[in-house]
Amino acid sequence: MSLTPAVLPLLRELGDLKRIRSAGRAGSIATRLFESGWSAWLGGGDQTDIAYRAMAAGLAAARLGDLDYAKLGELGMSDEERLSAMERSVDEVAGPLDAALVKRLKSQLGSPLPDVSDLPDTIAALRDQPRAGVTGPGKPRVMLQPEENHAEHSFIVALYAGLLAPFYDADPAEAFWHGMVHHLHSAAMPDAGYSGEILLGDLLGKVVDRARELALADLPDELAEVSARHLAAIADDASPAARAFHAADVTDRVVEIEQHLKRFAVTMALVLDDYGLVHDGPVKAFHDETLEAIGLP
């Protein structure tokens, strides 16, 4: 497989998991899946199993949002009914992806990650640590609100990396966890962006290393050792999984800023004609009459 622009619309859509929320659930889907993945690993779960379950949940959420396996069950759908709905959601978007990977992810749709238990401060802090946005040496910061947090960025990079792994002959689970650990240092280190890195100069490495030491010290020894190996692996792009990770990271950085700008391309013709904002239903004719009478659009 070769990476092509065909996968970009899906990646854009998945990036919006940073912005999808629902009542009774704290934080975006991306934040919660990041924390669920870490909670499952901290609870003794297998990294590979967790990776596929998290990716499956994220892929299904592209169209279903927070109508996930648990919520659909709460709303009266049988196991067969909710799996069918989630599989349809995956099928709508998964065309550009590796077929074998998609098949494996669909097999995990009925195995959602467990509820989050207590998290180490390092992991919990990432939902509260905002990303810098657009910065450049010698220039003021471009503030784009609402900003993403580092839990959201980490999960979306992990999701992208796992889904892109077949394009690099990489292990999807390994690439996924590269993404999940890559910003552990940000728990202790506020994000000043590229301009901050330049201003720190030769001391940047020292500061990042210390922030990582603090983060790893907050994890159980075994998880800290595994996380350190992931961090070492992504110091360059020598391995297939590292290339999948770096492709995911740079894509998310650009897509995140793109989504702030795309709102200016949205028109009433698009939302009414293409998206069916006033969609078919028993009172559609009355809705149309009302809008015409009141002068909308």
Image (cartoon, helix red, strand yellow):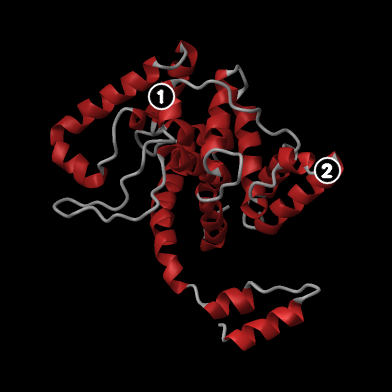
Q: Residue at x 54, y 38 (%)?
A: 26
Q: Residues within 10 Å of mark 1 (few under 14, many from 20)?
A: many
Quarter holding the C terminus? Answer: bottom right
Q: Residue 98: which disc?
A: none
Residue at the spot 46% in from the left edge and 46% down from the top edge: 248
Q: Residue furthest top?
A: 221
Viewer-nearest residue: 295 or 188: 295
Asked if one can make out residue 229 in the rendered structure from this viewpoint, the answer is no
Q: Is residue 180 left or right of residue 196?
A: right
Q: Residue at x 55, y 36 (%)?
A: 32
1 vs 2, front mark: 2
Can residue 112 be seen here? The reply is: yes
Q: Give, as a three-letter code, the residue at label 2.
A: Gly
Does residue 19 appear left or right of residue 106 in this picture? Answer: left
Give the quadrant of residue 100: top right
Name the residue beneath numbered marker 2: 76
> Looking at this view, is 257 or 74 the one in front?
74
Where in the figure is residue 160, as x and y percent of width and height? Answer: 52, 46
Lower position in the chain sequence, tag 1 or tag 2: 2
In this view, 243 is above or below 174 = below
Residue 45: x and y, percent? Answer: 62, 21
Q: Secondary structure at mark 2?
A: loop
In the image, what residue type sits under mark 1?
Thr
Up the image or down, 53 lies above or below 120; here it is below
Occupied quadrant, residue 209: top left
Q: Residues within 10 Å of mark 2 (few under 14, many from 20)?
A: few
| Cα distance in 3D space between marks 1 and 2 | 37 Å
> Would you name the residue on which mark 1 appears?
122
Q: List x then y, in percent, for residue 55.
A: 61, 40
Helix, strand or loop at label 1? It is helix
